[in-house]
Image (cartoon, rainbow, N blue to C red):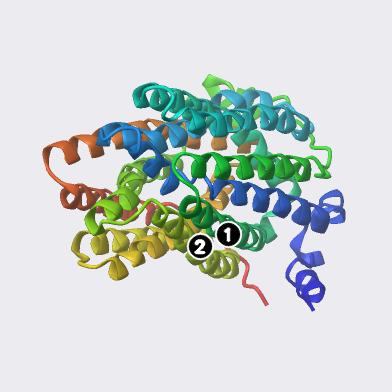
């Protein structure tokens, strides 16, 4: 039954106009990329940037700016380097080789995390924190270097007609393994004494990362026809050059509106770094609750990916992004007004719906804003040009917390999300053919 359902969901019809070399290996690539993502999600549940790592950082420092800086440097590092890869990626007939090289480098900082945890109590907490910070910068930058070739690889092996279904399917599988990982993390954090509990969890996660690397290597990528030049407006330029990027920004108003909306949305997401830390302080909870928060995010993310995956190929990615923004806005309001942990749990649930919708919708949307030959340029610009907002977010959130309180910071986040949603409503994606 599972195989029949899989074949039905991922069946390619003649009217889908999928190139033969992509269609031939499509189901194989769905499977290996889903395995890659699932194992990566499993590992990530042990060092979630929205729950586990802020709580871990809070054991080393009570400075809200430094705690908020951890997810910010990871997210900004994952975005800013991407534009510098666009020229190189655009010239590759196959991007799997460079993806594998950068994927190896990306996984190296994670290997030091167990050792870092074991340093706690042996050296000063301040020293451990700054070593941790260096590893997070390394993690972010290397994620940014691999981000563009990995996205381009997915775009080449997954046709546009099936992207929402693939993203929904793979993320549901990933969220399920993430839930398993978070439950294991709950057990480890509660069973063993600090900091051994973190060291064991980080070790388990490291194994999962290398298994995901093995799955990634099994992709069957078709040969891509590289064009030496791209024609944009009246200008003929090489892909990935600064001249082409300037021309895109000058002529593509739709893309400019996207950049503004996403930048504001990233600032509006600044509260996510504190939703777990605030809950532990507000309701006097133990560190193991952070893993429970992670599980809630992952479980609701499963529901989200099922919904967004089913709707995405019908309504298009722009609407999916708008609806996910609305979910996070509601979550921020709950964070401000909730008086019990049982109500506050819905903040993590709504954040899970938001993350699944943004991950699916934004991934699809940015692949559709430009021509196929310009895709690496658009992908790189989209991530890099919004990266500054990711660095601004912790500065603003830290200042708000030091001068006001959590409620004010959540309220400001809500205002930015509302403005981002309004502007995203003016962004256009590609029209969808009705599904039958």
Of 248 and 379, nearer the camera is 379
Q: Kindly identify the residue that appears in the image at 35 percent across and 33 percent down.
A: 60
Q: Kindly identify the residue that appears in the image at 64 percent across and 22 percent down.
A: 238
Residue 69: x, y in percent? 35, 33
Label pair 1/2, CB-CB below 8 angstroms? yes
Residue 323: x, y in percent? 41, 63
Q: Kindly identify the residue that appears in the image at 71 percent across and 44 percent down.
A: 212
Of 188 and 148, nearer the camera is 188
3D distance between C-alphas at marks 1 and 2: 6 Å
The number of numbered badges drawn on the structure is 2
Residue 61: x, y in percent? 30, 32
Describe the element under mark 2 as helix, strand or loop: helix
The image quadrant where one finds the N terminus is bottom right
State left or right for residue 46 relative to residue 345: right
State left or right for residue 231 relative to residue 128: right
- Which residue is label 2 attached to? 301
Query: Crowding near pointer 2: few (<14 within 10 Å), some, many (20+)?
Result: many
Badge number at residue 432: none
């Amino acid at each position: 039954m599972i195989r029949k359902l899989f074949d039905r969901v991922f069946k390619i019809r003649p009217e889908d106009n999928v190139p033969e070399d992509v269609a031939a290996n499509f189901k194989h690539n769905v499977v290996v990329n889903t395995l890659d993502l699932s194992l990566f999600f499993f590992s990530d549940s042990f060092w979630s940037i929205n729950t586990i790592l802020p709580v871990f950082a809070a054991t080393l420092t009570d400075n809200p700016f430094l705690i908020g800086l951890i997810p910010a440097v990871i997210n900004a590092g994952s975005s800013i380097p991407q534009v510098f890869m666009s020229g190189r990626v655009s010239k590759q007939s196959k991007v799997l080789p460079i993806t594998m090289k950068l994927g190896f480098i990306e996984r190296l900082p994670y290997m030091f995390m167990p050792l870092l945890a074991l340093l706690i109590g042996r050296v000063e907490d301040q020293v451990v924190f700054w070593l941790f910070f260096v590893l997070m910068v390394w993690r972010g930058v290397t994620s940014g270097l691999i981000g563009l070739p990995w996205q381009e690889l997915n775009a080449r092996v997954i046709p546009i007609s099936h992207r929402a279904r693939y993203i929904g399917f793979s993320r549901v599988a990933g969220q399920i393994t993430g839930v398993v990982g978070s439950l294991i993390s709950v057990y480890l954090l509660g069973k063993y004494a600090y900091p051994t509990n973190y060291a064991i969890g980080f070790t388990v996660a490291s194994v999962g990362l290398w298994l995901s690397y093995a799955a990634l290597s099994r992709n069957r990528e078709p040969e891509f026809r590289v064009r030496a030049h791209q024609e944009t407006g009246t200008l003929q330029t090489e892909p990935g050059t600064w001249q082409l990027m300037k021309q895109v920004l000058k002529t593509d108003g739709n893309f400019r509106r996207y950049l503004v909306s996403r930048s504001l949305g990233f600032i509006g997401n600044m509260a996510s770094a504190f939703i777990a830390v605030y809950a532990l302080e507000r309701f006097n909870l133990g560190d193991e609750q952070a893993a429970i928060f992670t599980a809630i995010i992952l479980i609701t993310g499963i529901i989200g990916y099922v919904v967004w995956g089913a709707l995405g190929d019908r309504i298009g990615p722009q609407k999916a992004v708008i609806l996910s923004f609305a979910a996070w806005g509601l979550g921020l309001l709950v964070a401000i007004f909730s008086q019990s942990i049982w109500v506050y749990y819905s903040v993590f649930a709504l954040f899970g719906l938001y993350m699944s919708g943004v991950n699916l919708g934004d991934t699809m949307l940015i692949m559709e804003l430009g021509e196929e030959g310009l895709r690496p340029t658009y992908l790189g610009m989209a991530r890099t040009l919004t990266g500054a907002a990711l660095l601004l977010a912790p500065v603003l959130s830290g200042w708000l917390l030091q001068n006001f309180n959590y409620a004010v910071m959540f309220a400001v986040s809500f205002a930015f999300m509302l403005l981002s949603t309004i502007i995203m409503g003016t962004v256009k994606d590609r029209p969808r053919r009705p599904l039958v």
